Amino acid sequence: SIIKLFVLPGDGIGPEVMAEVEKIVAWLNSEGVARFEIEKGLVGGAAFDAHGAAISEADMARAKAADAVLLAAVGGPKWDGVPYDVRPEAGLLRLRKDLALFANLRPAICYPALADASSLKREIVEGLDLMIVRELTGGVYFGEPKQIIDLGNGQKRAIDTQVYDTYEIERIGRVAFDLARKRRNKVTSSEKRNVMKSGLLWHEVISALHVREYPDVELEHQLADALGMQLVRRPKQFDVIVTDNLFGDMLSDVASMLTGSLGMLPSASLGEKDPASESRKALYEPVHGSAPDIAGKGMANPIAMIGSLAMALRYSFEMGELADRIERAISLVLEKGLRTADIAGGAKQILSTAQMGDAVLAELKAA
Amino acid sequence: SIIKLFVLPGDGIGPEVMAEVEKIVAWLNSEGVARFEIEKGLVGGAAFDAHGAAISEADMARAKAADAVLLAAVGGPKWDGVPYDVRPEAGLLRLRKDLALFANLRPAICYPALADASSLKREIVEGLDLMIVRELTGGVYFGEPKQIIDLGNGQKRAIDTQVYDTYEIERIGRVAFDLARKRRNKVTSSEKRNVMKSGLLWHEVISALHVREYPDVELEHQLADALGMQLVRRPKQFDVIVTDNLFGDMLSDVASMLTGSLGMLPSASLGEKDPASESRKALYEPVHGSAPDIAGKGMANPIAMIGSLAMALRYSFEMGELADRIERAISLVLEKGLRTADIAGGAKQILSTAQMGDAVLAELKAA
Ligand SMILES: CC(C)[C@H](C(=O)O)[C@@H](O)C(=O)O
Ligand SMILES: CC(C)[C@H](C(=O)O)[C@@H](O)C(=O)O
């Protein structure tokens, strides 16, 4: 059957890295491995420039109708002055919220060939393979009230609200425990229960879920500040980390830096499984941003975007083996010493975005 | 005149590291350099065990009457089950709030002798000297509503509120800009204005303050997640970082890990200067916690606590030179290869807490 991919290249280097994914999709189609149909839309600054919104209603409808959404990146200094509600990020946040993509999976893997690109010592990061499971549709990102009040006398008051309900914590907890069972069977749950009521509830709900449904999985709790520290000190102690929207944002960025390059890291944002169809809404995107400074130069690393396609195959289409093949192709390319500028280190030859995409495709074909 | 220090050893390794500060204070008194008077109180679990509160009213009154408070650390698994309002951390939070200690200064300095103890590569951290200025009496730590509501059906809702007013951002901004002028003249302001209204106001107020009062200082803005990343990637780009209570908590813990050991890092928490007396409320404490696992073993590193005394001399008592002398003594001890267990690396001889305190004192005497 036909698989509908809705593709949102977005801003900055987005279109360049997405082009490499499209090459791979075209090849998969031509091989008859699957029948992907690609529809394209606009998000972020690109959408604002076209229709004055961070994503149009028509594109939201297409995103909802698709089997999976692939998004590259949004934002850039060009849109620094646009109103808050139509800033580029609003498009991404609306996609997450309206598709109810509550589970954000952010693997941090340190490829042996790249261990020296990390600012951390090789022995600290070599072989690192952890997964951050970040709650994505709740917390301070979406809680109300969220406003700025004018108090007069030149004073304003800004308010953001962190809200979590039991069911929101439970469902993200299940995602983490289920993943751990397929990995090294350990979950680290993180909050600030010593300061936040939401941390207190988080700790209580995850602990109860553990006892009730996942007693076979090892569970530990670390305060979010201490976890940030441990990520830098001894990251290989972790398997699956589960945390809220804001802590997940910070901690996954710190974790990403352990691996040597942001340009390598994919992510998946998943909705609830429909019990009838067994399918779920999903969006796949690199962890990196739109990198306006190098946009249009053909320098960007497309590996995170290609890895995001692999995650789509694994989590949306039960094509785990094909996902493995793509990830192996990426590893092989790196082992051959092929590098884009961001991971160049001492490499002799630096590849362009398109050359890197071609190199991954060549390995795929050779396999 | 007599300087009144209110000393709160707290829990875990607290009493052990505080004892080394008391040795130094006694020596300063005997030398006639200053006349310190020490009064002692209880905070955290120790206070709970004695009077069922995380700090007694009498000790709060003593803290308010003192010229400065020295606190070592609070908390431990022993008090995991105590009610939320009297948990050990509540004592620390009450001191911060009731003394109005809005400015938390957290230096992260990488001593050359310890650069190899960091999990980061030597060239990334050697010579690191940054200062995190964290807002300490606002934000999500104290905003209301802050509660857990029972929704029935086994569902609860937890709410925390992040609140910032213009004046709170302005006064912490001034602290950061003033410090930068005495350092390398650069401030990096950090928030999540792409997601939080408080981030939007933070950015607006700091930017306006810069233009109005500190045009001579270099100002840049980095989103909090990106800053976490940059701290790991290229920490030496920073001089002074100014951020809110929660981001400051996370980012200062990440920064602390760059330096090789938490056992090395002091902090200062300052109130507003009284215009009449030119004095201010202040509390000085190490960044590290109570380390219950090594408590009572005489293994803890007292340097962060001794460094906190040095910060007290500098920021509360205009004794900057004496502070410099203490910090030099610490450097010399490290250069001689003297190490407590936490920073031992390959060191031949490991010092106890008391031996390290004596070693610092010996350098002070020799100078
Ligand atoms: C772009 C921004 C709104 C987003 C976030 O804060 O979630 C980004 O940092 C991320 O982590 O995906
Ligand atoms: C103990 C805890 C309440 C405290 C905080 O979160 O502020 C600590 O982590 C700190 O950074 O001083």
Image (cartoon, coloured by chain):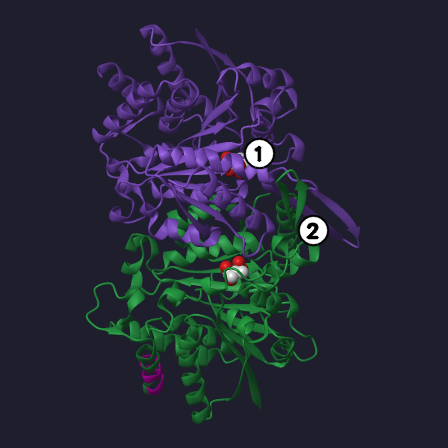
Chain colours: A purple, B green
Tell me residue B35's x, y (percent): 52, 90
**Quadrant in which the C terminus of chain B appears:** bottom left
Residue stretch rendered in magenta on the structure? B359-365
The residue singled out by tag 1 in the image is: A137
**Quadrant in which the N terminus of chain B appears:** bottom right
Tell me residue A217's x, y (percent): 38, 40
- Asked whether B177 or A62 is in front, the reply is A62
Left or right: A342 with respect to B309? left
Going 27% across and 25% down the picture, which residue do you hit? Answer: A328
Any magenta on residue A118?
A: no
| Residue A252 appears anywhere in the view | yes
Going 23% across and 26% down the picture, which residue do you hit? Answer: A332
Mark 2 and mark 1 residues within 8 Å of each other at the beta carbon: no
- Asked whether B277 or A125 is in front, the reply is A125
| Residue A300 appears anywhere in the view | no
Left or right: A116 with respect to A277? left
Determine the main secondary structure of the stretch shown in magenta: helix
**Marker disc for residue A283:** none
The residue singled out by tag 2 in the image is: B145
